[in-house]
Amino acid sequence: MNILTFDIEDWYNCDFISGDFDWDKHEVRIYQGVNRILEELEKRNQKGTFFCLGWIAEKHPDVIRSIQKQGHHIGCHSYQHELSFRFDEKAFKADTLKAKCLIEDVTGEEVNAFRAPGFSITKNNTWALRCLSEMGFKYDCSMFPAPHDYGGMPSYGEGVPKRIDVGDGRIIKEFPINIHRIMGKHIVFSGGGFFRLFPYWLINRWGKHSDYMMTYFHPRDFDANQPVIETLPAMRRFKSYVGIKGAFTKFQRLLDHYEFYNVEQADEIINWEIAPIVELNSLK
């Protein structure tokens, strides 16, 4: 099963370092980035899940409307792209609920899926999954089942969809990132920097040998003319900008070579009765 998802944020959102949230001062490139993606999906009658920032819904609601107009599944990606583990429970719920309500005000539809910025639900803030369930989310796509720059969740185990028992009879359906191991390293080839870095023939080879592939793309992944944030540390700057020039062509080829579902469509196909159940307390 191959799932198509996008994180809808602008070029400056790769900065988790400065703590500068004065975003109105930046050049706006989100419209052209999203439109370029939507045009490709419309050509193929392909649907995806778009995890949108509440800030985008507030400041640029037409971006959200353009996604909805094409019938895509719209999820929540926090309000202002802060890493989830930098919040306590109260602040996390306030940030997420603010985003959820802003997006729902634009679409008039319930938002039922969430992805944490930077896959930042870790062993130290598993309570976030319980909070999501309490706020009415059915799906989470935040699990990175391996070590990661922002923590990761190695205790999740195999990177396949699972049911997470968050307590009080509540279940949240988890759609994690898929991991490929190379010489003891955990590689994510289906989105982000590694998708941009690796040649397409290798991505295609790994994809064809994967029973489950969760993609995640950003408009900035395909924007070769975006400003560069020079203040990022060298390694973070490399990861943020490597391979952008040829990434859109690889994205087009991926769409041509694979059948994709959005998260809601995947939910309908999966036999959840036989899917593993994970106790929240085991994610430590």
Image (spheres, rainbow, N blue to C red):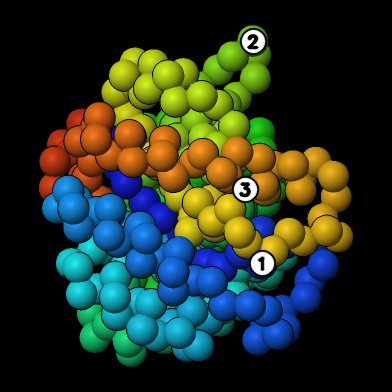
Pick whichever, 83 or 25, lies toward us.
Answer: 25
Q: Kindly identify the amino acid type of the residue bearing the numbered disc 3.
A: Thr
Disc 1 versus disc 3: nearer the observer: 1
In the displayed structure, 67 sits above or below 146; it is below
Q: Amino acid at mark 2?
A: Met
The answer to whether residue 151 shows anywhere in this view is no
Name the residue carrying label 3.
122
Q: Which residue is mark 1?
A: 12
Q: Which secondary structure, mark 3? A: loop
Q: In which quadrant of the rendered view does residue 238 lie?
A: top right
- Rendered-image quadrant of the C terminus: top right
For label 2, the residue is: 183
Residue sitting at x 23%, y 80% = 109
Q: Tell me the distance, in whole angstroms, between the alpha carbons under discs 1 and 3.
A: 24 Å
Residue drawn at point x = 45 percent, y = 84 percent: 60
Q: Is residue 10 visible?
A: yes
Dot label at residue 252: none
Report helix, strand or loop for mark 1.
helix
Looking at the image, tell me whether mark 1 or mark 3 is earlier in sequence order.
1
Q: Which of these two is toward me, 159 or 21?
A: 21
Asked if marks 1 and 3 touch (Cβ < 8 Å), the reply is no
Say above or below: 51 vs 150: below
- Residue 82: where, in percent of width, then height? 65, 68
Q: CA distance from mark 1 to mark 2?
A: 33 Å
Closer mark to the observer between disc 3 and disc 2: 2
Marker count (numbered)? 3
Looking at the image, which is closer to me, 265 or 282?
265
Q: Position of residue 188 (x, y in %)?
A: 53, 32
Residue at 25% in and 29% down:
257
Question: Which of the two marks, 1 or 2, is nearer to us in this view?
Answer: 1
Q: Is residue 59 left or right of residue 154?
A: left
The residue furthest top is 183
